[in-house]
Image: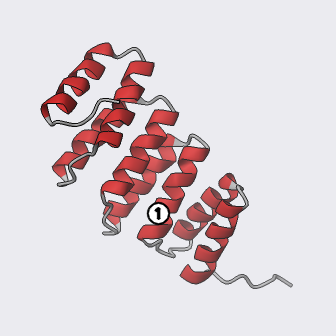
Amino acid sequence: MQKYRRRDLFTFDVSLKACAQGRVWQKALDLMDEMLYWEVHPNWGMYNLGILLCEKSQQWETALHFLRDMWDREVLPDDMTYSSVIGVCESSRRWSEALMLLQAMRRKGFPPDAATFRSVFRTCEACGQQTEALALADEMSSLGLPAA
């Protein structure tokens, strides 16, 4: 006999939070995949938690997937969401993706803050992309944002 397993938003939400608190990041990401498989639609907070967990496990592709899925499902990301995905790109040393997200953030009407600029700057610098890093430093200066 197969055991019945609830597959609703509440159950997934509680399970995700438990995995995050227990630092079982891969299991939490697996739960996000399972939600999408069963067509249980994550809410804004669940997507953001999933993106945060991607940073812990350096899964930049999954973080980008979650961001695209948010748009597809009309769960609108905000500046915090973009900053979190940029943080995943920084920890994974994905400079071109970080720059692309910075531009996307602006196009969607979210002006990046100093911390977001610094994250993209550090990513470019760590990956040897000095031209991009210097352009970001100049832009931060022109916007009156602190560089450090």
Query: Height in image: 116 above or below 142?
Result: below
Task: Name the image quarter holding the N terminus.
Answer: bottom right
The amino acid type found where label 1 is placed reads Tyr
Residue 101 appears left or right of 9: left
- From the viewer's side, name the closer residue of 25 and 30: 25
Residue 112: % across, % down: 25, 45
Task: Name the image quarter holding the C terminus.
Answer: top left
Crowd rating for badge 1 (residues with CA inside 10 Å; few <14, some 14–19, many 20+): many
- From the viewer's side, name the closer residue of 40 and 131: 131
Mark 1 — residue? 47
Residue 98 appears left or right of 34: left
Report how many numbered discs are placed on residues in the image: 1
Name the residue located 61 percent from the left edge and 44 percent from the top edge.
57
Name the residue located 51 percent from the left edge and 33 percent from the top edge.
92
Query: Height in image: 148 above or below 60?
Result: above
Residue 73: % across, % down: 35, 68
Q: Report the residue that reaches farthest toward the right.
A: 1
Q: Is residue 8 visible?
A: no
